[in-house]
Amino acid sequence: RSVIIGAAGGLVAATAHAAPPAVSMAELKKEGDVACLYHCDYGDNARFAQTLNNISNHYSAYGADPFGLQLVIIAHSVSVKYFLSTREGTPWKDETIDPALFERVTALAKNGLKVHLCEITFQRLKLDKGKVQNAPFISFVPSGVATVAALQSKGFAYLKVG
């Protein structure tokens, strides 16, 4: 549903949406011969941008074939801020993040990239899950670090930029 919000100088349309779906640990699967997780628990914009460069290069090496390569980002701690539609009411409310970073994530998702956000991070920081970007490639997992370990045990390679 859409709501109209009054703003200085005019009206702004905002879309309310439900939080992304939750994925259980049992639902996490390796779906191809080559799979890799990118572990993100940092809040440095340049480091996150480099992570996206590496993911882009990774897809490039496989001809951007979503069936030839399975990539996921596991985001917990401060890295969840890159997937919020607004940072109001969060510890990062005064930070500026270039919207082009999320646009790049969205473009990479066309190659099959999935993003898993840590449920524990949202609970501990009392973050509103409804503030997560409305995107079909984003889901919640019970724990970011547990998901990292679970995916490794299922044959995912591990990469962390930095």
Image: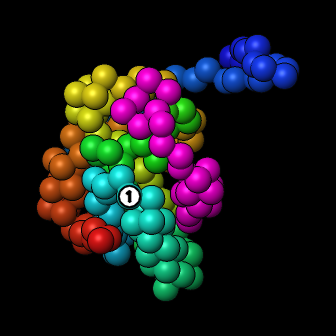
Q: Is residue 138 left or right of residue 104?
A: left
Q: Nearer the viewer, residue 11 or 153?
A: 11
Is 49 a magenta residue? no
Q: Amino acid at mark 1?
A: Asp
Taking the magenta stretch, the answer to whether it contains residue 103 is: yes
**Nearer to the camera, 95 or 25:** 95
Q: What is the x, y in percent for residue 122?
A: 31, 30
Q: What number of labels is visible?
A: 1
Quadrant in which the N terminus appears: top right
The quadrant in which residue 27 appears is top left
Residue at which label 1 appears? 44
Q: Position of residue 62 (x, y in %)?
A: 49, 82
Describe the element under mark 1 as helix, strand or loop.
loop
Quarter occupied by residue 107: bottom right
Q: Is residue 147 above or below residue 132?
A: below
Which contiguous range is marked in magenta? 88-111
- Residue at 41% across / 37% down in the picture? 92
Taking the spot 29% from the left edge, 71% from the top edge, the residue there is: 162
Looking at the image, which residue is at 51% across and 61% down? 112
Residue closest to the eye, 45 or 126: 45
The percent coordinates of residue 56 (x first, y second) are 52, 74
Give the left or right position of residue 87, taking residue 103 as reference.
left
Q: Is residue 132 visible?
A: no
